[in-house]
Image (cartoon, rainbow, N blue to C red):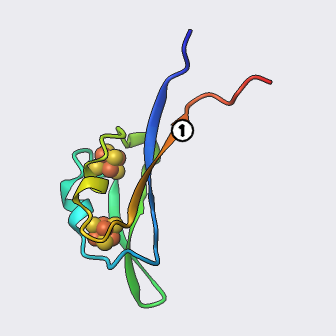
Amino acid sequence: MASERKALPVIHKTRCTGCGWCVGVCPPHVLSLEVEHWQKSAQLHDAPGCTGCAKCAVKCPFDAITMVRVTDEAPHL
Ligand code: SF4
Ligand code: SF4
């Protein structure tokens, strides 16, 4: 059985301007904006709900989202 693979967005807070484009484009609505130290940035608040579609990464005008491939299962060593 092949393990199920998908990618999750990693948001680079130093590049994120909090514009909210990614939040609006995410089909399952698992991204939100949060305020931390007076700065708004995007946050993946529901990682299991993310489909890995990468629409957020494509939409981000500031190149602040990188899709990182993850495996659902821990590797068997
Ligand atoms: S990869 Fe798709 S589902 Fe996941 S946070 Fe981005 S837009 Fe939403
Ligand atoms: S689209 Fe990019 S810059 Fe805008 S809130 Fe999302 S991650 Fe941040």
Ligand 1: does it lie within 8 Å of the C-beta at label 1? Answer: no
Q: Is residue 2 left or right of residue 26?
A: right
Q: Position of residue 54 (x, y in %)?
A: 31, 46
The answer to whether residue 75 is left or right of residue 30 is right
Taking the spot 26% from the left edge, 61% from the top edge, the residue there is 22
Instruction: Decide which of 61, 42 is in the foreground and name it.
Output: 61
Residue at the top extreme, as displayed: 1
Mark 1, secondary structure of its residue: strand
Q: Quadrant of the N terminus?
A: top right
**Residue furthest bottom in the image:** 38
Identify the image quadrant of residue 72: top right
In this view, the residue in front, 38 or 11, is: 11
Percent position of residue 46, x then y:
42, 50
Name which residue type carries label 1: Val
Q: Is residue 59 above or below residue 3?
A: below
Instruction: Check the picture and name the quadrant holding the C terminus.
Output: top right
Rendering quarter of residue 62: bottom left
Binning the other alpha carbons within 10 Å of mark 1 as few (below 14), some (14 to 19) or many (20 upward) gives few
Q: Residue furthest right?
A: 77
Q: Residue placed farthest to the front in the image?
A: 63
Residue at image x 54%, y 14%?
A: 2
**Residue at x-position 22% and y-position 46%:** 27
Q: Position of residue 76 (x, y in %)?
A: 75, 23
Badge count: 1
Residue 50, quarter of the rendered image: top left
List the residue tagged with mark 1: 70
